Image (tube, coloured by chain):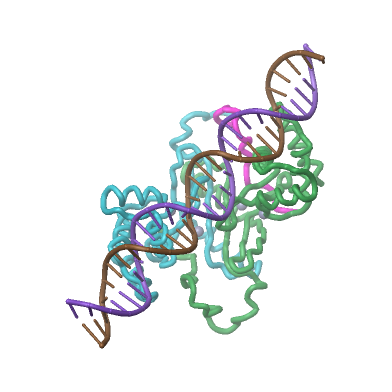
Chain colours: A green, B cyan, C purple, D brown
Amino acid sequence: MNRRELAIFRKYLERRGLKLTSERQALFDEVFSKHEHVEADELLVRLRTKHKKISRATIYRTLELLVEAGVVGKLRIGEAGYRYERLHAGDHHDHLICDQCGRVIEFFEPRIEALQDEVAVRHGFVLLSHNHQMRGICKRCRPRSKGSGSFGAEAAGPVPVPISSRPRG
Amino acid sequence: MNRRELAIFRKYLERRGLKLTSERQALFDEVFSKHEHVEADELLVRLRTKHKKISRATIYRTLELLVEAGVVGKLRIGEAGYRYERLHAGDHHDHLICDQCGRVIEFFEPRIEALQDEVAVRHGFVLLSHNHQMRGICKRCRPRSKGSGSFGAEAAGPVPVPISSRPRG
DNA sequence: CATGGGATTGCGACTCTGTCTCAATTGAGA
DNA sequence: TCTCAATTGAGACAGAGTCGCAATCCCATG
Ligand SMILES: [Zn+2]
Ligand SMILES: [Zn+2]
Ligand SMILES: [Zn+2]
Ligand SMILES: [Zn+2]
């Protein structure tokens, strides 16, 4: 199932007169070995131990190629740097992130996708991409608080106010 | 119209046993002087020239307070660091960003907001916040290409593929 | 007024990500 | 074999943000 994406990457390199070196192949393989949202340095560590002595610069350079080829997604999930994920051709999803355990859940809501186009048109925009993240507490992280309102009275951080408020005046 | 937000900030500080110092007041005033999406260092420069010799650490520390108090929004718009914007009580909006000129346009689409809640419920999430950005080319940045498909044949970067593709298998 | 203590500040060192430079290496083709 | 562009690793570098700390400020108290 990586066949299609590898072919896309190959074609991308070819069109640019670039080569599919063993380093690039190794990184491609690692990224496509499982579905995750992983940091560049984590990939570096893995390739360093498992495979070869690959450099950080090469990791970053190759990730950029994969992103431009369209087979890898690049997004900011936490406070720190970027996360990368393999993308399957013709697929799309957005993210739900648990503020407590960091779990990342993917979702696809066609009605939201359609409304985005509508909003873009309304503002005369040609949409090229979007980034939609929702944050909160996942199912696993709140087995408590079934009765009344607010959960965990940890008294730290702002009060969780519902977001769906009024439109701008 | 900053009255309400200043009151919120004051109360926030009070509850934490903190003080509304002149530096904090100055930063509040600067942020609330106009509606924009501004970087921390830009605020530093402005306060340094106009007002006093305020330090970078204080800017960052105070911005964090304002964010926690809920009167300032913190978001990533470009590749670089965070941008900050004043928030008016009970207001909410998301962002459309022009990839070419960097213009930031705000929008509010209640149907999207509602669908987000729906998606969250579907996945057992308690929603606390969300971040929704759409990127593309704004009205002003494309007076050309009225006939056929792709605009500007600059042959750089990935081909703009429509995002509204199929759901994940 | 003198003292004490928590909050605040500026400074600079530091961390973390990611980029860039450059010399050495590789590899396909002439 | 020779040539030349693409590639690589190493380390310097850069930008954004954080941290530790001594000096200060601000009150409250004695
Ligand atoms: Zn989407
Ligand atoms: Zn994902
Ligand atoms: Zn929204
Ligand atoms: Zn905004």
Q: Quadrant of residue B4?
A: bottom left
B43 sits left or right of A149 in the view: left
B137 to B168, vertically: above or below = above
Does residue A114 appear anywhere in the picture? no
Q: Nearer the viewer, residue D28 or A120?
A: D28
Does residue B127 appear anywhere in the picture? yes
- The residue positioned 67% from the left and 58% from the top of the image is A106
- Image location (x, y in percent) of residue B149: 59, 31
- Image location (x, y in percent) of residue B135: 53, 45
Q: Nearer the viewer, residue A37 or B128?
A: A37
Q: State which quarter of the image contains the C terminus of chain B.
A: bottom right
What's drawn in magenta, residue-wise?
A: B149-169
A159 to D20, vertically: above or below = below
Q: Magenta span: helix, strand or loop, mainly?
A: loop
A35 sits left or right of C23 in the view: right
Q: Is residue B152 part of the magenta span, yes or no?
A: yes
A84 sits left or right of A160 in the view: right
Q: Quadrant of residue B155?
A: top right
